[in-house]
Image (spheres, rainbow, N blue to C red):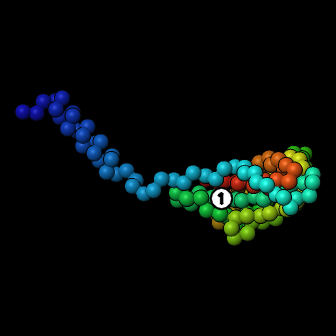
């Protein structure tokens, strides 16, 4: 004979079993790339370093490069507020843009992503260009 506690236990097993069987069995979501990477740039002149930017967007469970994203580099936050960039460009098919050699210092980098039928989305990060180093900034849009 089924008692109320036994019925509750059976119902809980059915609910848990259903939840487990409905769980997404696909591979887990990729970890996003790190925001900042530094590497040696021996070809850089003393007092300068190199800056490159990658733009990624989460597509399904993987991060994909974003071509044609606008990227602007500013010398100061004041320049950013006034929209007076030091340099400007768009990412290549690999989601990359290389700004080459810059003087050692801090720079503000704004990336704008344009998608069909959606308003543009922008992110702002700070990059520190170091002597004879290559700094890579990875912008990730979810």
Residue 64 spot, x, y in % from top left: 61, 62
Quarter of the picture holding the N terminus: top left
| Residue at x 93%, y 51% (from the top left corner) | 47
Q: Is residue 44 left or right of residue 18?
A: right
Name the residue carrying label 1.
56
Q: Quadrant of residue 91?
A: bottom right
Neighbour tally class for label 1: few under 14, some 14-19, many 20 plus, Cα within 10 Å? many
| Residue at x 34%, y 51% (from the top left corner) | 22
Between 49 and 26, the one nearer to me in the picture: 49
| Residue at x 20%, y 38% (from the top left corner) | 10
Residue 88 visible:
no
Q: Is residue 15 left or right of residue 56?
A: left
Q: Which residue appears farthest toward the left when viewing the image? A: 1
Between 128 and 133, the one nearer to me in the picture: 133
Looking at the image, is 65 positioned above or below residue 3?
below
| Residue at x 37%, y 50% (from the top left corner) | 23
Residue 17 spot, x, y in % from top left: 28, 45
Give SS at disc 1: strand
Q: Which residue appears farthest toward the front when viewing the image? A: 42
């Amino acid at each position: 004979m089924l008692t109320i506690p036994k019925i509750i236990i059976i119902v809980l097993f059915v609910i848990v079993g259903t939840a487990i069987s409905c769980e997404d069995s696909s591979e887990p979501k990729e970890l996003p790339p790190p925001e900042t990477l530094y590497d040696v740039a021996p070809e850089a002149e003393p007092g300068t370093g190199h800056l490159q930017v990658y733009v990624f967007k989460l597509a399904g469970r993987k991060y994909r490069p974003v071509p044609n994203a606008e990227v602007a580099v500013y010398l100061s936050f004041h320049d950013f507020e006034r929209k007076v960039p030091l340099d400007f460009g768009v990412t290549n098919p690999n989601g990359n843009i290389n700004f080459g050699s810059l003087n050692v210092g801090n720079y503000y980098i704004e990336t704008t992503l344009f998608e069909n039928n959606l308003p543009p989305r922008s992110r702002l990060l700070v990059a520190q260009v170091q002597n004879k180093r290559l700094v890579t900034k990875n912008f990730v849009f979810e």
